[in-house]
Every structure is written in structure tokens, then in C-alpha cells.
């Protein structure tokens, strides 16, 4: 098969998959998960139902693919922020802020929904968490060498601390509160200051 034809076929397949995924996400957002069917997805995507079944076996498979695409997009965005020029401490702060705001927004949009329960499991999340942890460890190590964060604790431990602390962003009421949380986490990452202890009288 000629390469041009192969590329055209693959491009068409990607377009059909993307149309189905986008239509599903839109339907769930507008009407809720329970009301979404393969027939509605096919109609909204502008494809036949039989064609849709060639790509996905059910609604859950489409939503899992959609969520995986979202996670990859978020990771790419965080990597781009971390790779920008500038002081390591500033880049670390920017990445933590972006991550916390993403966490807050996703929780706000899907809190208590069937969608949240459906998509927040699976191997792609484990892989994404590993990649995010690696990104933060690298940034923390670089920031520690520059004196912007503490060097008396290993980057792996600091990354675990940061990610666990920022999980609280899910329950915060506003973006302003999320930014305050990030500031608090950054203060915990700052180089340790000598402590003065006063003996009890």
C-alpha cells in the first residue's frame, strides 16, 4: 500500500476517534454519564453506530481514552512550564501552581459524579503519576543545587511531600485558596533555617 494512502487512512482513523472522544466528553458534560449512549455519541460525532463500534466497544472505553488524552495533555503542559528559561525556584513554583490549579479545576467539575469514579483508575494514572514525580524530582534537584529549596532532604521525599500536600487543592473553595496552598508548600520546601529552642523555665 502506498505511503500516502497509508498516511491518509491513519489520519482518517485518528479523526474518527477524536470526533467520537470529543462528542462523548461534550455529552457527558451537558447531560451526565447515565444519559450517554453509543447511538447518541455516533450521532453527535457524525458517524455511523457500526463505525463507532469498530473503534470502541462501549462508552466506558471512550471515556477512559478521553481521560488518558487529558492526562497526557496536562503532563505535556507541566513539562513545558518546567522547561522554560528562568531560575529553578521560579519554574518549580510555576509547575506546582499549574498542577494545583489543574487538580482543583478537575475536582470542581467532576466532584461527586459518576465520571470521576469511572475514569480515576487504571494503569495510565499510575504511569502519569510516575512521570509527574520524576518531573518534580528533577526540578527539585536543580532548585536545591541553586539554593532555592532545601538540600537536607532527598528530592524524592520532597516530591512526595509536595504532591501529597497539593492534593488538598481538590477540596479548596477558590483559585485564590489554591495559590495560598502552593505558597505554604513552597515555604516547606525552602532551605531549612536554624531553629532556636528555649528551655522550659
Image (cartoon, helix red, strand yellow):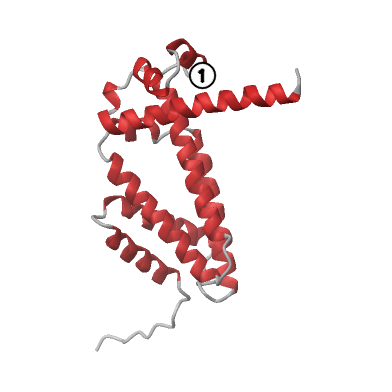
Q: Quadrant of residue 162?
A: bottom left
Circle 1 Cα neighbour tier, 10 Å, few/some/many (<14 / 14–19 / ≥20): some
- Residue 3 percent coordinates (x, y): 74, 25
The residue located at (37%, 31%) in the rendering is 25
Q: Nearer the viewer, residue 48 or 25?
A: 48
The residue located at (50%, 25%) in the rendering is 17
Q: Quadrant of residue 31?
A: top left
Disc 1, SS: helix
User: What residue is disc 1 on?
Assistant: 55
The residue located at (56%, 70%) in the rendering is 86
Check the image and name the residue furthest to the top. Answer: 50
Q: Nearer the viewer, residue 8 or 93?
A: 8
Where, quadrant-wise, is the C terminus in this rendering?
A: bottom left
The residue located at (28%, 46%) in the rendering is 108
Q: Is residue 6 left or right of residue 182?
A: right
- Residue 18 percent coordinates (x, y): 49, 29
Where, quadrant-wise, is the N terminus in this rendering?
A: top right
Could you tell me how many numbered marks the image carries? Answer: 1
Amino acid at each position: 500500500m502506498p505511503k500516502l494512502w497509508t498516511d491518509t487512512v491513519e489520519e482518517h482513523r485518528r479523526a474518527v476517534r477524536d470526533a467520537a472522544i470529543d462528542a462523548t466528553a461534550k455529552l457527558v458534560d451537558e447531560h451526565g454519564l447515565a444519559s450517554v449512549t453509543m447511538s447518541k455519541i455516533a450521532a453527535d460525532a457524525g458517524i455511523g453506530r457500526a463505525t463507532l463500534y469498530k473503534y470502541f466497544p462501549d462508552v466506558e472505553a471512550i471515556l477512559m481514552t478521553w481521560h488518558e488524552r487529558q492526562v497526557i495533555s496536562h503532563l505535556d503542559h507541566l513539562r513545558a512550564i518546567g522547561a522554560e528559561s528562568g531560575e529553578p525556584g521560579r519554574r518549580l513554583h510555576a509547575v506546582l501552581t499549574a498542577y494545583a490549579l489543574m487538580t482543583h479545576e478537575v475536582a470542581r467539575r467532576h466532584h461527586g459524579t459518576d465520571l470521576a469514579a469511572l475514569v480515576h483508575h487504571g494503569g495510565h494514572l499510575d504511569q502519569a503519576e510516575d512521570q509527574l514525580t520524576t518531573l518534580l524530582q528533577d526540578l527539585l534537584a536543580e532548585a536545591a543545587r541553586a539554593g532555592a529549596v532545601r538540600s537536607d532532604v532527598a528530592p524524592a521525599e520532597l516530591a512526595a511531600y509536595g504532591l501529597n500536600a497539593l492534593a488538598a487543592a481538590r477540596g479548596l473553595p477558590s483559585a485564590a485558596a489554591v495559590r495560598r496552598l502552593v505558597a505554604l508548600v513552597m515555604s516547606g520546601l525552602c532551605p531549612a533555617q536554624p531553629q532556636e529552642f528555649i528551655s522550659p523555665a
